[in-house]
Image: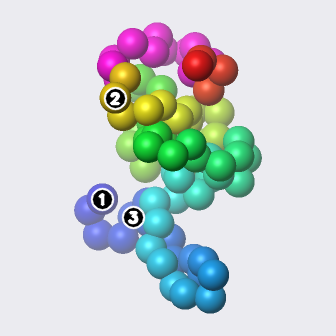
Amino acid sequence: MRGNYGVMRIKIAGRWAIRNVHRIAFAVWKGDIPEGASVLHLKGCVKTCCNPDHLYSKRQSLDLGTTPRGAAPWSLP
């Protein structure tokens, strides 16, 4: 991300780390991010958006262009 917009410093296990805000929002409102998965935005959303209703996780090995706009992708396998 350009500058520090969309990132946050948080303490994890006693150490400071920089994380993307959308990943933190997903973890807080929807649960842990599965191993090997990315947190993605619904089509048309701004990359820096951290609204949990606009985020979903998907394994990187899957085709990322298959989720239709407005779908509930977090319910997909």
Magenta stretch: includes residue 71: yes
Pointer 2 residue: 61
Q: Is residue 43 above or below residue 51?
A: above
Q: Position of residue 12 (x, y in %)?
A: 60, 78
Q: CA distance from mark 1 to mark 2?
A: 23 Å
Q: Position of residue 22 (x, y in %)?
A: 52, 51
Which secondary structure, mark 2?
A: loop
The residue identified by callout 3 is 5
How far, Cα to Cα, is label 3 from label 2?
Answer: 28 Å
3 vs 2, front mark: 2
Tell me the quadrant of the picture where the N terminus can be found. Answer: bottom left
In this view, the residue farthest toward the left is 2
Q: Horizontal placement of 12 versus 8: left or right?
A: right
Q: Which secondary structure, mark 1?
A: loop
Whole-number angstrom distance, CA of label 1 to CA of label 3 = 7 Å
- Please provide the residue range marked out in magenta: 63-73
